[in-house]
Image (cartoon, rainbow, N blue to C red):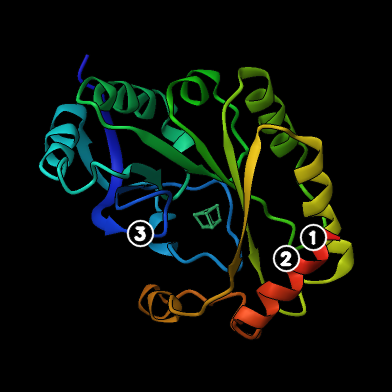
Amino acid sequence: MNYKARIDSVYNGSAVDGKGLRCVVFFTGCNMRCGFCHNPETWTEKGNEIELTELVRKIKRYKNYIQNGGVTLSGGEPFLQAEFCTALVNALHVEGISSIVETNGLIADEDLINACDGIRLDLKNQDGRVDSRVLAFLDKCEELGKDVTLTNVLVPSLNDTPEKLNIVKNIKNKYSCIKELKLLAFRKLCTGKYERLKIPFPYEKYDEGTKKDLDKAYAFLKE
Ligand code: SF4
């Protein structure tokens, strides 16, 4: 079966979406609207339709370049197109290419979790609570023994408070499948995207995060 997906773009050369140099596939469609989102252009349900064979062919061109890294399925929310993503990950395995999936953790699709080589789950604690579906997702990763990197976007004065950092800490301590915790500083490089899309940037009012903010938060999490 030749599966089809809706994607925004394929970017080759990322060094920040997992280990090594990576090829990143940005899927379109998202079931969240995070105030700090860097990729609001992927929120659309539409996107560019692409067949599995064409996408695999495209990625294979970068095989040498990504040999110490791999492919990152990102978006948008890749789990909204879980069947295609599972087929993609399996097709890339045949080519000797590993893949991880970036997710908000709202859809715990067992087949995709099983098939991929790792999960990067971005924990959304900015409004002071974590969706119960995210915990169900982590339960599934724990059950299947899938390695998870937990990321969290640190927005100064919003979620660098002890109360919200404790949410991150408690989750990290609860799940042994979480092998790494990465705090990401909030950035406003995406402001131009919001302007072009003519939609308000919800976190415009917050300051960007600094290395000092990150160091302070890491120190708190280690206590
Ligand atoms: S889940 Fe990711 S893509 Fe979706 S709105 Fe949040 S940051 Fe953006």
Cα separation between marks 1 and 3: 25 Å
Q: Label 2: how many residues lie within 10 Å, few (<14), some (14-19) or many (20+)?
A: some
Quarter of the figure that contains the C terminus: bottom right
Does the residue at mark 2 contact the one at mark 1 (Cβ under 8 Å)? yes
The image quarter in which residue 153 lies: bottom right
Q: Is residue 131 visible?
A: yes
Residue at mark 1:
221
Q: Label 1: how many residues lie within 10 Å, few (<14), some (14-19) or many (20+)?
A: some
Q: Give the residue type at disc 2.
A: Tyr
Numbered circle sitting on residue 15: 3
- Residue in the foreground of this view, choosing between 108 and 50: 108
Q: Give the residue type at disc 1.
A: Leu
User: Which residue extends farthest top?
Assistant: 1
Q: Give the residue type at disc 3.
A: Ala
Identify the residue shown where x is 54% and y is 24%: 109
Numbered circle sitting on residue 218: 2
Cα separation between marks 3 and 2: 22 Å
Cα separation between marks 2 and 1: 5 Å
Q: Is mark 3 within 8 Å of ligand 1?
A: no
Q: Is residue 209 visible?
A: no
Q: Is residue 223 above or below residue 195?
A: above
Please provide percent x and percent y for residue 30. 49, 48
Please provide percent x and percent y for residue 1. 22, 13
Does the residue at mark 1 contact the one at mark 3 (Cβ under 8 Å)? no
